Image: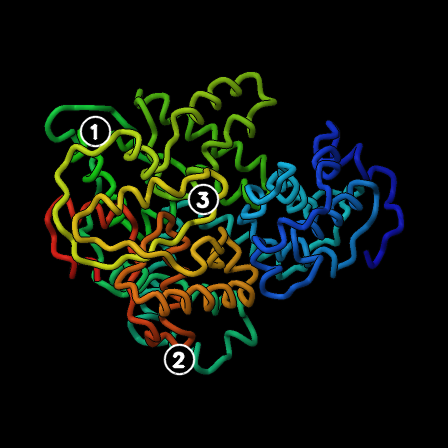
Amino acid sequence: MGGDEAGPAGHGREALDPTGELHGIVADCVHCGFCLPSCPTYQLWGEEMDSPRGRIHLIGQLLDGANASPTAAEHLDRCLGCMACVPACPSGVRYDRLIEAARSWASAPEPVRPLPPRTSRERVLRAAIFATFPYPARLRLLTGPLRGAQRTGLDRLVGRAGLAERMLPELAAALRVAPRPDGSASGRRAASRGRLPERVAARGRRRAVVGMLTGCVQQVFFPGVNIATARVLASEGCDVVIPAGQGCCGALSLHDGRRAEAAAFARGVIETFERAEVDAIVVNSAGCGSAMKEYADLLAGDPQWAGRAAALSERAADFSEFLARLGPAATRHPLPVTVAYHDACHLAYAQRITSQPRELLRGIPELALIELADAGTCCGSAGIYNLVQPDTARQLGERKAAAVADSGADLVVSGNPGCALQIASALAGSDGRSATQVPVAHIAEVLDASIRARPARTLL
């Protein structure tokens, strides 16, 4: 491992894996290689240590007391956490548990830390991300300077000059994926704005009372998606409860191995929706829904919260999952548009939801649904990945953009805000000038347009 010597006392199973769960997961891997074709980084480079099987081997060595070199740590950091390998594994290896644990080890205290400490630059970047993105009010403060840079063309000037790429590649990545001044990912006119009320009444016969998570990135960058979500749910006979002041669900923290931080966010969300007294909690962001369904596991060791967490996990449902289960009530009007559906990783692999969004889209008259050549491959967003691993994210984004261009689709549809930002950025090209004129929309926006009999051009 570039330093396979035994670590100081405290390294290894006893310190990193007190229950033995991680060691057991490593032992479940039979090294068959079925995971290799599913792994985006292995697809890019064909490097064994950048595959799930290779990373499991590295993690096993760390659990046995080895110290990792910076190169070995880089192989772990390059993992997107897309979880495509989990359903591909015939042995049922819970790779998600392993990589989330391994991500926490670089910041573990001495003497139990088996990975080299992150550089000062990496620590500052991550601290800034986690001090900003889970807090919508703070995130909104960044939108002013961002909009100014976009309106003056400064972002494109910086991109063409290449200065940010050479000196601050993370900043260049942030500028690339940021939504345009109109509040959309792709440059099309954003959907109607405005503050959502705390309750939206069902239209017609009430069929359910649901809570709605507004999300952090979703409510700041994509308010139109939340508005469309509430309208569709109401049109389908749901009273929609939207608690004011709801906090972050903890998805970014959980998927980066910051479990204590994620647990604190989870407790806040649990309390909020317990007070709401709803039948289900509908989530329109794949990463958020995945995290909320993991609350039962996240808080299993806390006797005061375990039961409450399990109850919320049972009620959490993705927007597409909930609607497919509820069944249609509102009339769908024709929407003559060719749609390519992109599977968000935390929807397809973490939540195993793939057929429901397609079923909903096929229920719209005159909508033609086509598949992307790499529909199941990560677009490179992966939570904070496109900010901390911008080069790899860019390569994956370019592959996704090429697949979209080859598909002949009029519109790309997904169910996750990070994917929308990443794919739209890749379609626009590195210089900010649109290379492929295909907009990106959330599935809620498409359903909303059909139910409200809006013309297809409102999505394009």
Q: Residue 295: horizontal and vertical position, in percent? A: 50, 29
Left of 354 or right of it: where is 190? left
* Residue displayed at 19% across by 40% down: 231
Label 3 sits on what residue type? Ala
Identify the secondary structure beneath mark 1.
strand
Report x, y in % for residue 355.
37, 41
Q: Quadrant of the C terminus?
A: bottom left
Q: In this figure, which residue is indicated by the disc labeled 1? A: 238
> Disc 3, disc 1: CB below 8 Å?
no
Q: What residue is shown with label 3?
A: 348
- Examine the image and state in which quarter residue 198 appears: top left
**Residue at horizontal 77 percent and vertical 47 percent from the top:** 114
Using the image as rendered, state which of residue 55 and residue 73 is in the foreground: 55
Q: CA distance from mark 3 to mark 1?
A: 25 Å
Crowding around mark 3 (Cα neighbors within 10 Å: few <14, some 14 to 19, many 20+) is some
Q: Secondary structure at mark 3?
A: helix
The relative height of residue 403 versus residue 340 in the rendered view (above or below) is below
Q: CA distance from mark 3 to mark 2?
A: 37 Å
At 61% from the left and 54% from the top, the residue drawn is 79
Q: Dot 2: what SS?
A: helix
Is residue 227 at least partly visible in the picture? no
Image quarter in which the N terminus is found: bottom right
Identify the mark nearer the N-term, 3 or 2: 2
Decide if residue 338 is in sight here: yes
Residue at the disc numbered 2 = 157
Above or below for 398 versus 72: below
Q: Nearer the viewer, mark 3 or mark 2?
A: 3
For marks 1 and 2, give the CA distance. Answer: 47 Å
User: 401 or 389: which is nearer to us?
Assistant: 401
